[in-house]
Amino acid sequence: MSLAAPLPLRFQVGARTLFAVKRRLVRIGLSLDRALAAETPHLPPLDPADHGYLLTSVPAAKADGLRRQDMLALERPHYARRYADLSGSFEAYLAGFSGKTRSTLRRKLRKFETLSGDALDVRAYRTADEVAEFHALARAVSRKTYQEKLLDAGLPSGAEAEAEMRRKAALGEIRAWLLFLEGDPVAYLYTPAEGDTLIYAYLGYDPALAKHSPGTVLQLAAMRQLMEEGCFRRFDFTEGDGQHKRQFATGSIDCVDLLLLRKSPGNRLLLASLRGFERLAAFAKGLGLGRMARRIGR
C-alpha cells in the first residue's frame, strides 16, 4: 500500500495561495527531537503511481545528503524551527528575553486585563469531556479567523475531529486553552503532545480584537501554566517562522523543506515554475514590495 497522498504544491504571495498543483507525495516530517539530533530521514520505496517525496524540517546540514541522481530536487528557503524550553520556571523563562520583549509582553497583558475588567479569563482543557467543550467553543472562534477563511487551516470541525481530540485527551495527550472576554471565547490554543513535547497545532482569535493581541495574551498564559505544571519538556512551534514564534521561543534549529520528484517533463516544468516564482517573490521583496505582498496575502 502506498504511503503517498495528493498534496498541493502552492504558489503563494504572503498567506494567499494564488494556485496550486497537486502531486502524489510521500510526506516525511521530522519531529523536533529528530531534527535536534540531526537525523537523516529514511526514504521508503515509491509505488509506480507516486511522484516523489516532501521532506519537512530537515536539518539544513543534512539536505545535500538526501538529493538523489534519479530525482529532481527543490530545496525551499531555510527557516528556523523554533521551540521553547518548558523545564524551568516561568520567571526564568521571561528573564531570558530582552528587556524590550518583556516590556512588550507585559504591556499587551495589561492592555487586555484592562479590557476584561482587570482579570484574565483563561480556561484550560485536558480531559475528554473538557476537550469536547473546548472544541465546540473554539470552533465558534475559528470560523471568524483568516486561517479558516483564507487558508482552510482553522481548527478541524466535525464529529471525527472531536472524537480524535477526545481519544488523545483520554491518554493525557492534549492541552488546550480558551481566552474569554465578557463570557465569550475570543481566542483558542490547541496543543497535542508527542511524548514530552507539546505541538503548536492551532492558534486563532477573533479578528475584531486583533489590536488587543488576544493570541499573544493566551500564549503567555499557557506558557505560565505549562511551566507550573512541569509535565512537558519542550513546546514545538513546528515548521515555518513568524513573529509570534520568535517572540515566545527560547531556541531554534536551521531547517529546510526538500521536494524530490521523479524525473519527467511535467515535473521539470513544475520545479522550474516554482523556482522562478520564488525568485520573483524574493526580488520583489528586495525592491521593498514585501509590504504590498503581505497586503495581497491577507
Image (cartoon, rainbow, N blue to C red):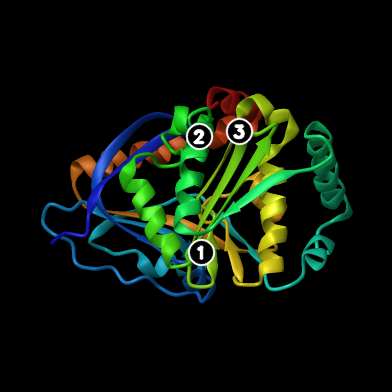
Tell me which residue sits at (46%, 39%) in the image: 136
* Residue denoted by label 2: 142
Residue 275 vs residue 241, the one in the foreground: 241
Circle 3 Cα neighbour tier, 10 Å, few/some/many (<14 / 14–19 / ≥20): some
Mark 3 highlights which residue? 285
Image-based side of 93 in relation to 189, left or right: right
Which amino acid type is shown beneath numbered disc 3?
Lys
Q: List the single residue furthest toward the front.
A: 129
Q: Residues within 10 Å of mark 2 (few under 14, many from 20)?
A: many
Alpha-carbon distance for marks 1 and 2? 34 Å
Distance, label 1 to label 3, CA atoms, is 23 Å
Q: Nearer the viewer, mark 1 or mark 2?
A: 2
Indicate which disc, 1 or 2, sits on the residue closer to the N terminus.
1
Residue 26 in the image: state x and y as whole percent.
Answer: 27, 57
Going from N to C along the chain, the mark reached first, 1 or 3, is 1
> Tag 2's secondary structure?
helix
Image position, residue 191 (x, y; %): 52, 55
In terms of secondary structure, where does tag 1 sit?
A: helix
Depth order, front residue of 121/156: 121
Q: Amino acid at mark 2?
A: Ser
Label 1 belongs to which residue?
60
